[in-house]
Every structure is written in C-alpha cells, then in structure tokens.
Image (cartoon, coloured by chain):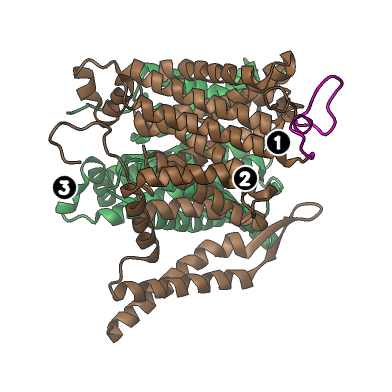
Chain colours: A brown, B green
Amino acid sequence: MEKKDIIQSFKDSLFTGLIALALFGPIVGLRTESKGEGLFITPQWGLVFLLVGLCILGRFLINLNSARKTEITFFSKFTSKFSVITEDKAKHFAITAILFAVVFPFLPFTDRYFMDVAIMILTYIMLGWGLNIVVGLAGLLDLGYVAFYAVGAYSYALIATTFGWSFWICLPLAGVFAAFFGILLGFPVLRLRGDYLAIVTLGFGEIIRIILINWYEVTNGPDGITGIPRPSFFGLPFKRSPDEGETSFHLFFNLEYSTMHRIIFLYYLILILALITNYFTLKIRKLPVGRAWEALREDEIACKSLGVNPTNTKLTAFAIGAMFGGFAGSFFATRQAFISPESFTFIESAIIVAIVVLGGMGSQTGVVLASIFLIGITEMFRDLEQYRMIAFGGAMVLIMVFKPKGILANRKPTILMHGDKK
Amino acid sequence: MEYFIQQLVNGITLGSIYGLIAIGYTMVYGIIGMINFAHGDIFMIGAFVALISFIIFGLTGVALPIILLLVLLIAMLFTACYGWTVEKLAYKPLRGSFRLAPLISALGMSIVLQNYVQVAQGARVKPMQPLISGGLEFFKNSEFIVTVSYLQIFIVILTIILMGIFTYLITKTDLGRAQRACEQDRTMTALLGINVDRTISITFIIGSSLASVAGMMFVLYYGVIDFYIGFLAGIKAFTAAVLGGIGSLPGAMLGGLLIGLIETFWAGYVSLEYKDVAAFSVLIVVLIFFPTGFLGKPDIEKV
C-alpha cells in the first residue's frame, strides 16, 4: 500500500470522527436528568470520546482492509457458505432439524431457561411461517400481522375465561376469529398496491391495539386478562395436587411432579402447531390457489389477463395467514396465562416481518434460521437489557446490507415448465 | 362556534408539525421509492437536541428570540448529521436491491435509534418549562374564550416561512431541479452529469432538518418528550404523506393539516381515547376512494 493511500484513509477516518462527534456529542454527551423542578444536564464526555475513538479506529481499519482488496468480509463468507449447505441439502437439513427439535427437551444440557427460549423461538417460527404465506408467497407486505396474533390471543382468553371451554375447542375458534378479521381488513384494502397496503395494515394493527386498551368492559383495558386456563394433556391437568375427582398428569403416568412437564408439553404443542403450519404451506403451494399466489407476486397484470381474480386470491392468502397468526396467538395466551395490549405492539409486527424478509422471502428454512438468529441475538444480550434492542436492530440492518435477499435467497418457483433447468 | 374555532386553531398548529415531518417522508419516497421508517425517530432526535440546547441556553440568559433562532439552527445541524449518516449506513448499500430490503433496513435503524436514545438519555419523560407563554384572546364576551397562544402563532408562522424557503429551493434552484430530475429517472439524471448520490444525501439532509424543526416545535408545544414520541408522530406523518399523495410536496403539507385537523376535531367532539383510530380510519377510507391520495399522480401500470 502506498503512503498516499494511508494519508487518504487517515483523513477519511478523521472526517468519520468529526461526524461521530456531531452524532454522539449532544445525545450521549449531554444527558438530561430531572432533579426536583426541571431538567439538568450531566456531561459524559469520556463516553463520547471513547465512541468517537472507536468510530475513527473502525473506519481506519475498514479503509486498510478495502485497500487490500479483500472485499469479502467474514460475514458474507460465513452466510454464503451457509446458504450453499442448506440449499443443496435442504431436505436433510429439515429432517435433522426436526429430529433435533423432537429430542431437544431430553438433552442433558437442556434446562428451564433453554426450554423457554426454545418455545419463544418456535412461536416466532410459527408466526414467521404464517406471515410467509402473505409476504413470501402472495407478495403482500403486511406490517400489522400482530393484530391477528392479538385477535387470536384475546379471543382465546375471552372464550376460555368466560365459557371455560378447553384449549382444543378454543384454538380453532381463535383461528376462525383471526381469519374473519383478516377478511374484514383485507376486503377493502387489498386493491391497494405495495406500500399503501403496508401502511394501512400498520394502521390496522394500531387500531386493534388502541381498541384493546380502551374497550375496558370487554378487554379489561391496559390491565389485561389474567387467569387464562392452562392447557391440559388430553384432560389431564399439570397440577401438583389435582382437584377432587380429577387425575393430574404426573399421577396418571406415575411420575414425580415437576413443573418441567408442563413446559415440555407446551414445547411439543408449539412444535406441532408450527409443523402443521409448515406442512400446510408446503402443500398449498402445489394447489391452484398457492400457484396463483406465487404468480400474483411475480406479475399481477399477467395474472389478471389469465383470469385469476387478484382480490379473491389475495384475500385467501390474507385470511389463511391471519388464521395461523390466530393459532399462535392462542398458544401465546395459554402459555403466559396473562395477556395485555402491551404484548401486541408494532415492534412485534416488525420482528415477524424481519424474520420473513431476513430469512429470504418465501423460504421456509430461512424463517427458521432467521428466528434462531434474531431471537438468539436478543437472548445473548439479555444481561445487558438496555442494549438488547440496539443489537437486534443493528443485526437487521447488517443482514440487509450484506445479504439483501435474506439469509437464504431462495425464490425458486415451485413449478417449472418442462425442459427448464432446475 | 367558539369551540369550533378553538379546535381549528389547535388543529392547524398540530397539522403544521405533522406536515413538516411528512415532507421528509414524501421527499425520500419520491426520490428513492422507499418508506423511510427511521424518519419518525429522526424527528425524535431533533426534539432531544432542541431540548438539550434549550436547557443550555436557558442558563445563559440570552434574549428569547436569539435562543429560538440558535436552537433552531443547532437542532437542524445535528439532526441533519443523523439523517445523513442513516442514509449512508443503512440505505445507500441497498440501492438497487429488491424493494423490501431498504424497508427492513429502515425498520432496523428505527429500532436502533429509539433504543440508543433510551440508553443515552434515559427512559423517563423529559419535561420542559414553557418558554413562550401568553396569547391573544378572542370572543371575550361569549361563554367560551378562544385563545390563540403566541406559541401557536410562532409555530404556524415558522412553518409558513420554512415552506416558502423550501418551495423556492425545490422549484427555482439547481439543487431542486436535480432533485426533481432524480425523482423522474435516476439513470438518465446520472448520464446528464448530476451526482445522484449527493442529491439523495441532500434530500435526506433537508428532510431531517425539517423534521428537527418539527421536533423543536413539539418540545415547545407539548413541553414533554420521551424516546418513544417518534413512532406515533412518524406514523401519523406518514399517513399524512399518503393522504396528500405520496411524492407530492404540497400534498404532504395538505395531508399534515388534514391529519392535524381530523385528530383535533375527533378528540374535541367524539372521543379523546380513540383519536389515533380516527387518523388511521380516515386513511383507510381515503385510500379506498382516492388510491393515490389527494394530490398524488396516478401511476400507470405497465407490462
């Protein structure tokens, strides 16, 4: 490398430092604190200089690196290797992953914490697969998916607490309600194109949340609904001491009582629900309606001229996606035993959309990888509670910048003409 | 009647703030065709910079008009840096990739900015003493006295001035011409020797500065901010941009005013709790009947 280059990159780094100073100076450097009456400022210049220094150093190293023409960074090398492995052996990968998921609760290192994280990841996988029908297959950007999740959770909670029906009756009902809301929203708005649709669905998500907060008589407002019944193992509850005339799970199978039983049951429940979603999606892609979705995604005008009714086709995608959102919602309600509007904010929609897009739209395996990656990142930063969401957002930006098509850029059409190369 | 006029005045004030944010959305959408989700958070950062500078200048005891001017300039400068950096880091590498990629990147950026401010400034709400007090009173003989505060007058006049400068910038200068050319055809513009990347950067800088002015107004008007204000204000401003016809600059201002008025009247006459529902419901209804907003160009689908 020439001397000129070094001076050039040094200047560039100093400029970066200047910008960083402008960025961090006021917001990080001058922290406002309320003390008694009014606000006071606590300077934190040390932190600012540290951050600025890091920016300068980082920029300088990047410059040195790019001067050596080593464009491929570790990150993209890693992910491209990843996509080669999984695209070639997608089937093997899927089978291995499912097997691993099945034996996971009985592995020696699995404890309560791992189970909770695994359940959370599976919930997001299911939501991702549900939304994948809408975003990945039909190509409709839905930024208010959490609304259907909320409808599912609340309808499950309300039915179960009011009528006392069992989980297995409430679950399909919750799905039906969510699908109904999907049609209700979809009917007027599906004529809109891309971004308009995105913003209207976002608005719908917010409307549902505001109604949940304010409709105190039904939803109990911001306090939420408590005491949602836990699911039972085909009628056998998971209790230490069952009520009179009832047998609980551990007595029936002659096991020692453990809270893990319920957790493991919930884990398998969400695993099965998620696998049903996946199976359904894989099958429906081969049916006329699934083909119509993918065709609509690729070219709407061509579809219209071939006699596909775009509104009805989109509506089915919307309703089916909403239904799976509703299933996931009722699972969420029964797992938490408590729901409140706070669980259904826009950030949840953003996370689910991010999972679908980061995974590579339309790729079922991609959704799995993206969920594990994103939820895993937030879990790794769990001890640093405040920095968790920064890491999450940063990961979203980084993946998009380095792999704009998602981790698995898989947009192969399901059907090919005879003679087309695979 | 008096109540109606009072609501009208409040609505126009709020609408000015939304309109200024909406311009940022509509400009960015016009030039690179993406929803800049982080724009609401840029507005929030503008509000924080304004708050911090108000506190600092409040201690020096300079005359009020000078403080306002200084804070305005400082907020615009620092917030523009944020807008510029966000574009460089998160959107520029994605130019030319498929449509959803920048949107996701913007969502990520929005999450980063929000939580960054939460970490740096704390999660508590930040109250500020009112700086501009007093106002004009009308209909003194009737039951309901209509008050137009000096602050409201200041906000509306400042908005009109900025809009004037901005319109001049877009319609009369070389920069504005380059910007409009980029909107129509980026490749052709580049062929004619215009630096497209620079034009896009400047678009972000202008949008962020206007958002920071809106942030300053927000601090003055409501007197309390937190790291979360960007989300709702951003969504409403985006709604305003869509309502007016996204990509159209007068449309953004018109949409902002409409959203401000709808929200205020809904809160004043129907119900306070559901005022946010009103804005979104109106959006849905408008989009069904005017799919490209009020002043948007109808887009022709080509095969």
Q: Are marks 2 and 3 on the same chain?
A: no
Residue A50 or residue A276, whichever sits in front: A276
Q: Determine crowd level at label 3: few under 14, some 14-19, many 20+ residues with C-alpha closer than 10 A.
A: few
Q: Main secondary structure of the magenta part?
A: loop
Q: Which residue is depicted at the point 32% across and 71% down?
A: A66
Q: Quadrant of the N terminus of chain B?
A: top right
Residue A259 or residue A202, whichever sits in front: A259
* Tag 2–tag 3 contact (CB < 8 Å): no
User: Which amino acid, mark 3?
Assistant: Met
Q: Which chain does the residue under circle 3 lie in?
A: B
Circle nearer the N terminus (2, 1): 2
Residue A118, percent across and down?
59, 45
In the picture of the structure, the residue carrying the numbered disc 1 is A262
Q: Quadrant of residue A82?
A: bottom left
Does A228 lie within the magenta span? no
Q: Which residue is depicted at the point 72% across and 31% down?
A: A338
User: Which amino acid, mark 1?
Assistant: Arg
In the picture of the structure, the residue carrying the numbered disc 3 is B188
Residue most toward the left?
A419
A168 over A371 or under it: above or below: above
Residue B25 or residue B160, whichever sits in front: B25
Residue A166 or residue A236, whichever sits in front: A236
Report the span colored magenta: A238-257
A26 over A258 or under it: above or below: below
